[in-house]
Amino acid sequence: MSRVLKVLNAGPMVTVQDMGRPGYLASGLSRGGAMDRLALHEGAAILHQKPHLAALEIAGFGGTFEAGEDMRIALTGAPMRASIDGTPVVWNASHALPKGARLTIGAAETGSYGYLHVGGGIDTPEIMGARGTHLGAGLGRTLQAGDALPVGKDARPDHVGLRLDPDARFEGGLVRVMPGPQTRFFAPAERERFAAETFRRDARGNRMGVRFVPSGSPFASDAGLSILSEVVVPGDIQVTGDGTPFVLMAECQTTGGYPRIGTVLPADLPRVAQAAAGKTLRFAFLDVDAVTAADRAERRRWEALPGRVKRLITDPADIRDLLAYQLIGGVTAGDDPDRD
């Protein structure tokens, strides 16, 4: 089979990811899927395809990949230095990757998770209704040199040279939180202090969760740590035994006994995921009406992404560093993205 993406070498945490496996909490399996789900929507918008298609998630450092035949790629999420056969290419954009061409992706310049999308999606076999790797559950594995990933049929193979300005989420910032059933275990003064605090992203963190260190004293609940274990979901903020908040992420456990002061809105989980070690975050509690409005606004934002896609180049004479723009394959961003 020639329609494959070959892995010549890969960083330690490159995996196939999609939107995950909802609906298996009762069986002890968390949703999993991409840490930055917005990046999947951005890649789908750039390539004019559906966001459920699987892509490669790159944590920190990418690798080198070779096209088994002509294909399209898009790069989203945390910006990383990338090149095709030695020629630099732009992040947050789509490019042609001809047969035999080699795509090299280096380290993240900011943020934590980058994404490599291909036209037609990564077409590995589905397991429990999804292709995404869930390391904690033993579903799939990290990529290794010599892997050959099947790629699905591309419905629009000639549409390249498009870009999308990403939503800023790679430098920390404000994260919105909804109160939960255990928020009441924290005294009003503790909740106010939590909302006024600035937290630093700890070096400890993975696809299960991310630790945030307060600049002041630790936090504590009135219930201490003696609470019943309950269902937990991505976004829940557990306050662990040392009083440090831990935001649960895509591959979190399905139950937990640490008190939860609140839950990060799904719309803001990409900001948490993309905060590199040392970046700072603040948390703001929202009421029910504001949470509902934020959820609706996020859905509208996802739906509007295709309308924000632009041509990568309008006039090559306006580009100072032309080598930073991939023009291989005879297709430039001057082509009309809506032309059949």
Image: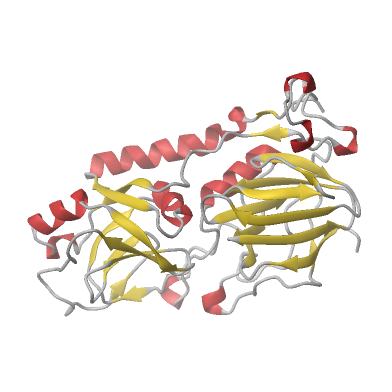
Residue 288 location (% of width, % of height)? 24, 45
Q: Is residue 264 above or below residue 226?
A: above
Q: Is residue 29 above or below residue 331?
A: below
Q: Quadrant of the N terminus?
A: bottom right
Q: Residue 54: tell me if it is visible.
A: no
Image check: 144 left or right of 284?
Answer: right
Work out whether residue 5 or residue 199 is closer to the camera in this orientation and state it.
199
Image check: 149 left or right of 257?
Answer: right
Image check: 257 left or right of 85?
Answer: left
Residue 162 location (% of width, % of height)? 71, 33
Residue 285 location (% of width, % of height)? 23, 48
Q: Residue at x 53, y 51 (%)?
A: 37
Image quadrant in which you'd find residue 28:
bottom left
Residue 93 location (% of width, % of height)? 68, 39
Count of numbered circles in the view? 0
Q: Residue at x 51, y 52 (%)?
A: 111
